[in-house]
Amino acid sequence: MIRKVKGTRDILPPESRLWQAVEAEAVRTFGAFGYDEIRLPLLEPTELFVRGVGEGTDIVGKEMYTFTDRKGRSLTLRPEGTAGVARAYIENGLGQRPHPLRLFYAGPMFRYEKMQRGRYRQFSQIGIELLGAATPEADVEVLLALHTYLGRLGFDDLVILLNDLGDPEDRAPYVARLKEELGPHREALCADCRRRWDENPLRILDCKVERCREIVSGTTPIAETVSAEARAHVDRVRELLETLGVAVRPAPRLVRGLDYYMRTVFEVVSPALGEHAVICGGGRYDRLIADLGGPAVPGVGFAIGEDRLVDVLPEAYCRRVLEVPFVAVVPVGAAAAAAQALAQRLREAGVRTEVEVSGRSLRAGLKWAAKTGARVAVIVGEDEAARGEAVVRDMAAGEQRTVTVDALVEAVEPLLEADGGADDGH
Ligand code: HAM
């Protein structure tokens, strides 16, 4: 047997319906905010991520799927979407379009990570990017879109954590200060953090190891050291969010794992999965496009981890999506065409309808209908077909009656709704 590659997943039905549903809701919600989809390649030049995400990050340092193609070019399966959006902005001259630009994307990303629950090597993200606005109001819009989306999926326990990373100029003095404060404890840090000391010292701040967290809790939060301008920016973001009723929790040690961030950074965590389970990460990146050789265009956005999102979806939402009532049409004798014609009427009325196409007898056909979970069976034989009729059977009640083909939809719909859950407005 050939098995799937480690860290990849098969998303099977009916779970795939949940994926379709959250993606459709993303198109709807972010569309209502004016975001249009951008579809980008999965393959990019390796240099894009080295320069965009940053050489010292875990992603670039040890998690990229990088290979040399047949012409000797170094290519990488994208580990995230923002760098690709920035490249596409520059390459397609999107700077010519009215600003700000609102972009949405969804699709697979690749990182060579250690497998565990909620962590895969191929995973999917749903993200938005707002390009060309440097104001706090832009950050607020992005966070409001996120809050609205999660609300529409029925979440009420997710927490948005927010921090201020200051401007890039604030970074070096802070890192120096941090190292000074951590210096006496350097040997007590975990092996990963001792490695981070030179490669990416800021990441020591959000190490999940208890001992490191204790040590770090004694250091000065980065937000206390940033420029007055950066602080005013993030204060304004907080103020506006409060007015809008979007709850955020200050997270003074939140630093994010990608180098392009500045000022506002945030994550969404799920208490259901534990504090380490980050559903979404994002923030402001005003230098990224310029760093990649483009114009000085600011940006802010986020990406939701779709695998994790689906994993913690509220139960009521899942039920609504998964329990779609449907009809099974069972032809008896030479009634295959009549069965499909009846099914078409139901399908056109928006009713999910499966036809028995395996040549089962009436008895076996009804058994099949029960097993697949059909709420209603429609039985049609040659005689009924000739008279323009069909038999409608309520599977739960075991009751049936004959109706004319014209009255079929009318007869079936109330039975589908009877159990509840049928009409959810979706
Ligand atoms: P990120 O924090 O690296 O940010 O990833 C965003 C989300 O993707 C994470 O919060 C998590 O839910 C999900 N994720 C990341 N790695 C994995 C994995 N191995 N398995 C499953 N899920 C995973 C970014 O990628 C930024 N580009 C976000 C952004 C957009 N910032 C501004 N705009």
Image (cartoon, grey):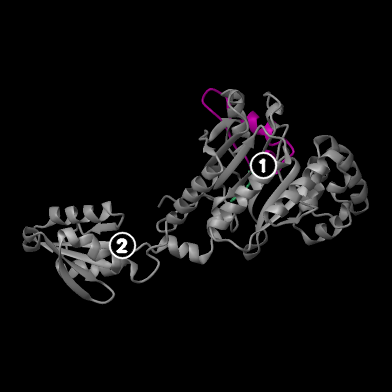
Q: Which residues are magenta?
A: 46-75
Evaluate whether residue 227 shows in this view: no
- Which amino acid type is shown beneath numbered disc 1? Ile
| Residue 32 among magenta residues | no
Residue 326 shows which numbered tag? 2
**What residue sits 58% from the left and 44% below the top?**
127
In this image, 105 relative to 203: left or right?
left
* Front residue of this view, candidates 66 and 139: 139
In this image, 246 relative to 407: left or right?
right
| Mark nearer the N terminus (2 vs 1) | 1
Q: Quadrant of residue 138?
A: top right
Q: Quadrant of the C terminus?
A: bottom left
The response on whether ligand 1 sits within 8 Å of label 1 is yes
Q: Residues within 10 Å of mark 1 (few under 14, many from 20)?
A: many
- Which amino acid type is shown beneath numbered disc 2? Phe
Secondary structure type for disc 2: strand
Secondary structure type for disc 1: helix
Q: Nearer the viewer, mark 2 or mark 1?
A: 2
Q: Quadrant of residue 366?
A: bottom left
